[in-house]
Image: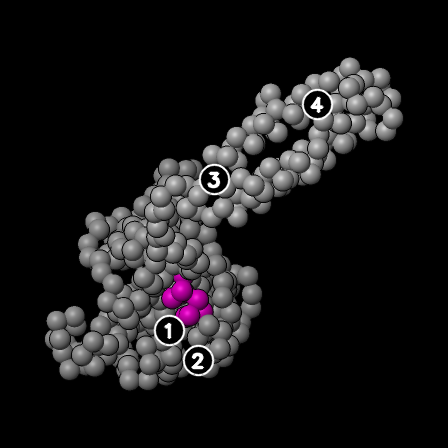
């Protein structure tokens, strides 16, 4: 550049001199002072920028670039020197403020989801498919098609939460996952091997083992020649796959409108191995869910010929499994979202 040094604002900016001054600084205060001198509001760079305005327009870009380069280089030199001074000079007397690490934990699935997936895996390995249905159901799917006629006393076993939509008492929060059986049978012909997990609702007072919101998993098999023996074997297979070979299962007579015959199935107590303890009320058995052979009336409601096909179904509360496996209680623990619980499992 051929500009007169007196009028060239960049000429005052001697980078070597600046670097030397910065390198000679020995305290944080001295560095602050230098930062003000070079880069401060009234510092060299600010003044140079100010006087660019007085230059001829064609000279401005080149001088502007030179000022920017200088400013960046000074900034870098200041930063490097500050790092070189180390904590004692920068902060005065040193304090060790090291805290224990704050490692970030990775999230994971909720225990109910883990259990659901584990069980799905067991059933998929047995050749089942997984199906889902809506949580808000009609009276037809939740009751009528499952052979609960209107006014049938069995409806009272399932305290229902109705949704204020359409005709009174026609739309409800499903009280079990059994309506998905109907949806699956409507949507495909036999053979059917399906599990249906999901959230269910009942108008129930919370207690250690009951919650108005809970989860169930339902199983349905429809094929030619299925017998009660197949049902019993399937229950034995998935309970031992989930709890281990030592656990045995048993069936006791029961009643459900949509299965005939019906049974309750129980597991040998996982805590005392069947010898009797407080958890199993000294019976050696823990009741898990309901099951039975699909009632011919249910087949008729979905257009499957009960003379040609037979089937079995079972259903149980999903929370029961981890409650037994890990001793989690009360059931509301699953829904409180207390981080201590969520992190632990
Ligand atoms: N749906 C029944 C209940 O919630 C359980 C069940 C499922 C029973 C399938 C028999 C067959 O109590």
Instruction: Name the side, left or right, on which 137 lies relative to 265.
Output: right
Sequence-first tag of 2 and 1 = 2
Q: CA distance from mark 3 to mark 2?
A: 88 Å
Q: Is residue 189 magenta?
A: no
From the image, tell me which residue sits under label 1: 293
First of labels 4, 1 by sequence position: 4
The reply to whether discs 3 and 1 touch (Cβ–Cβ < 8 Å) is no
Q: Quadrant of the N terminus?
A: top right
Of labels 3 and 2, earlier in sequence is 3
- From this view, report whether residue 82 is shown above or below residue 333: above
Q: Position of residue 320 (x, y in %)?
A: 29, 65
Question: Main SS of the magenta segment?
Answer: helix
Category of crowding for the residue at label 3, using alpha-carbon neighbours closer than 10 angstroms: few (below 14), some (14–19), many (at least 20): some
Where is mark 3, residue-wise?
27
Cα gap from disc 3 to disc 4, whole angstroms? 27 Å
Residue 138 visible? The answer is: no
Q: Which residues are magenta?
A: 113-120
Residue identified by numbered label 2: 226
278 sits to left or right of 65:
left
The x, y position of residue 198, in whole percent, is 41, 58
Q: Is residue 136 above or below residue 118?
A: above
Which badge, 3 or 1, is on the more N-terminal residue?
Answer: 3
Q: Earlier in the sequence, mark 4 or mark 2?
A: 4
Q: Nearer the viewer, residue 7 or 265?
A: 7
Between 194 and 35, the residue placed more toward the observer is: 35
Q: Which residue is mark 4?
A: 48
Dot 4: element: helix
Residue displayed at 49% across by 77% down: 125
Give the CA distance from mark 4 to mark 2.
94 Å
Q: Give the Cα distance between marks 3 and 1.
A: 87 Å
Q: Is residue 65 above or below residue 188?
A: above
Q: Secondary structure at mark 1?
A: strand
């Amino acid at each position: 550049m051929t500009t007169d040094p007196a009028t060239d604002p960049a000429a005052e900016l001697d980078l070597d001199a600046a670097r030397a001054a910065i390198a000679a600084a020995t305290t944080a205060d001295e560095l602050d002072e230098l930062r003000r001198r070079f880069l401060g509001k009234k510092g060299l760079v600010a003044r140079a920028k100010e006087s660019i305005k007085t230059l001829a327009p064609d000279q401005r870009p080149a001088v502007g670039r030179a000022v920017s380069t200088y400013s960046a280089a000074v900034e870098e030199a200041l930063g490097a020197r500050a790092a070189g001074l180390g904590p004692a000079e920068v902060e005065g007397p040193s304090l060790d403020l090291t805290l224990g690490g704050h490692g970030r934990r990775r999230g994971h699935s909720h225990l109910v989801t883990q259990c659901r997936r584990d069980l799905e895996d067991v059933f998929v390995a047995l050749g089942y498919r997984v199906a889902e249905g809506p949580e808000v159901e009609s009276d037809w799917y939740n009751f009528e098609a499952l052979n609960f006629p209107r006014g049938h006393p069995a409806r009272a076993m399932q305290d229902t939460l109705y949704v204020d939509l359409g005709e009174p008492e026609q739309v409800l929060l499903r009280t079990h996952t059994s309506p998905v059986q109907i949806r699956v049978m409507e949507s495909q012909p036999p053979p059917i091997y399906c599990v249906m997990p999901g959230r269910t609702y009942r108008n129930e007072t919370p207690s250690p083992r009951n919650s108005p919101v809970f989860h169930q998993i339902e199983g349905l098999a429809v094929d030619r020649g299925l017998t009660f023996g197949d049902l019993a074997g399937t229950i034995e297979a998935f309970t031992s796959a989930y709890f281990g070979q030592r656990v045995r299962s048993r069936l006791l007579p029961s009643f459900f409108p949509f299965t005939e015959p019906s049974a309750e199935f129980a597991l040998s107590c996982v805590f005392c191995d069947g010898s009797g303890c407080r958890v199993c009320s000294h019976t050696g058995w823990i009741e898990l869910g309901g099951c039975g052979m699909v009632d011919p009336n249910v087949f008729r409601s979905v257009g499957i010929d009960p003379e040609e096909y037979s089937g079995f179904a079972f259903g149980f509360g999903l929370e029961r499994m981890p409650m037994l496996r890990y001793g989690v209680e009360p059931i509301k623990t699953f829904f409180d979202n207390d981080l201590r619980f969520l992190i632990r499992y």
